[in-house]
Amino acid sequence: MTKIAIAVLDANGLDAQISPHFGRCPYFMLVDAEEQEVRAVEAVANPHYPDHEPGQIPAFIHSLGAQVMLAGGMGGRAVAFFQQYGIEPATGAAGTVRESLARYLGGDLQGAAPCDESVTHGHG
């Protein structure tokens, strides 16, 4: 079983919209997946929304037991924090949780690169 955290804009389960930047999302969707099958979905409010300090959100995601973090984008320091916690960050998620999960579980959504916005606002 893999626990996947996904940065989202709303709490609409598998139909929740992906947040373009993980640090500014109001919710995280936690998904328990086994192979290609979703076993559980839970919305969790981001306690650091709308402002966060570097490292707070990776620590929070780690406390939830997630092994993977999917987001539209994140800064390079965030990528490093997630990796220090043993959490696999993956950027480039878009659309809904359902769509991004399908891409991740199918092997089409992997790896993390700092987003342009993050570099611009000093999180690069």
Image: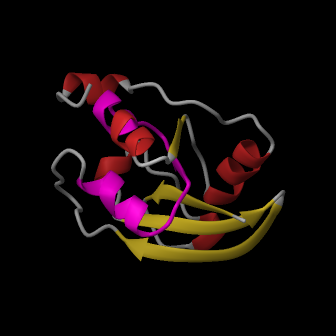
Q: Position of residue 106 (x, y in %)?
A: 81, 43
Q: Quadrant of residue 63?
A: bottom left
> Magenta segment: does it hold 72?
yes
Residue at 44% x, 50% y is 19
Report the front residue among 68 and 123: 68
Quadrant of the snapshot with the N terminus: bottom right
Report the front residue among 56 and 109: 56
Residue at 52% x, 59% y is 5
Report the front residue among 84 and 18: 84
Instruction: Answer whether residue 74 is visible to the viewer in this image.
Output: no
Q: Position of residue 59 (x, y in %)?
A: 31, 57
Q: Which residues are magenta?
A: 56-79
Residue at 45% x, 64% y is 28
> Magenta segment: does it hold 58?
yes
Left or right of 86: which side holds 99?
right
Q: Position of residue 22 (x, y in %)?
A: 38, 48
